[in-house]
Amino acid sequence: MGLVAYGVLHLLIGWLAVQLARGIDRTDADQTGALQAVAGTPGGTVLLVLIGLGMLSLALWQAGEVLLWWHGLLDPQHRWRAAFVCVKCLAKAAVYGVLGTTGLLFALGLEYEADERLRDLTDETLDVRGGALLVYAVAAGVVAVGLYTLVRGLTGGFMKDIDLPAAPDRWEPAIEALGRVGYVAKGIAFGLVGVLLWRAATTADVSTATGLDGAMTAIASVTAGPWLLGAVATGFAAFGVYALARARFPDRDPSS
């Protein structure tokens, strides 16, 4: 349920990015923009509830994976790997939890602009002592996540999240191709989010701290931007289909 909701969100983000590439700036090309697009459709409230519950389910599932890894913290030979996986799982659980809660709030008619909130939060952080260092640290973390995602796409490491013995052999090449394109596109987009956040800390201009939608807009503004953004949009849509395939054939033992 959670992976289906996650896949649908990425398909919607891809569609919104295509609209942005065509010059149709109707809503933000990010997660909240995707939820706003759902809210404006017939039966949108029901869909938002399903997406919200799905993302919360995914958050619980991701947090539950820690139970499969925590014992590795007691083993000196596997301590660092176990710690990395536990932190990664908890971070993903937090992100999915926020998306799920946002979906449910949108279902109740309560909306907010993620990019505006990020700008306000960045501005408030820069005003306090040591705030710039914190923004730099967050920006570096986002860039690191982008690089990690990019590497996963280039190496095909994401295929371990698929139950390959259960998936038909004829589907494996397509699933891998979709995953590679999707992870590379996401890695580039999130890396750019981190770069823009770093720039905001350097210049004290919080207008560049606009999250995923800001990264999409930045891509669209360069030479050949619509084509590049179209490629990124295709990548997000490809990741959405990959997530649906993962929902159909999920790895049953993430600790292996």
Image (cartoon, grey):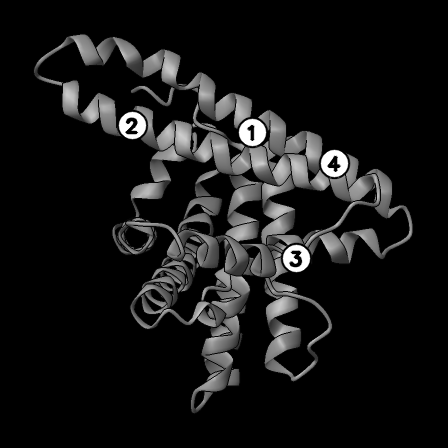
Q: Locate residue 155, reporting x and y percent.
A: 25, 51
| Left or right of 86 in this view: 119 | right
Q: Quadrant of the C terminus?
A: top left
Looking at numbered disc 2 in the image, what kind of residue is underneath it?
Val
Name the residue that disc number 1 marks.
Answer: 58
Instruction: Please name the residue that numbered disc 2 is placed on.
Output: 85
User: Can the viewer see residue 149 in this picture?
Assistant: no
Q: Are marks 4 and 2 in contact (CB under 8 Å)?
A: no
Which is nearer the N-term, disc 3 or disc 1? Answer: 1
Q: Position of residue 97 (x, y in %)?
A: 57, 32
Mark in front: 4 vs 2: 4
Callout 2 environment at 10 Å: few (<14), some (14 to 19), or many (20+)? some
The residue carrying mark 3 is 113
Left/right of residue 252 with respect to residue 57 in the rendered view: left
| Residue pictured at 66% horizontal, 32% vertical | 54
Q: CA distance from mark 1 to mark 2?
A: 16 Å
Q: Are marks 3 and 2 in contact (CB under 8 Å)?
A: no
For label 4, the residue is 104
Q: How far apart in space, not on screen, are marks 4 and 2 (Cα)?
A: 28 Å
Q: Quadrant of residue 84?
A: top left
Q: Secondary structure at mark 1?
A: helix
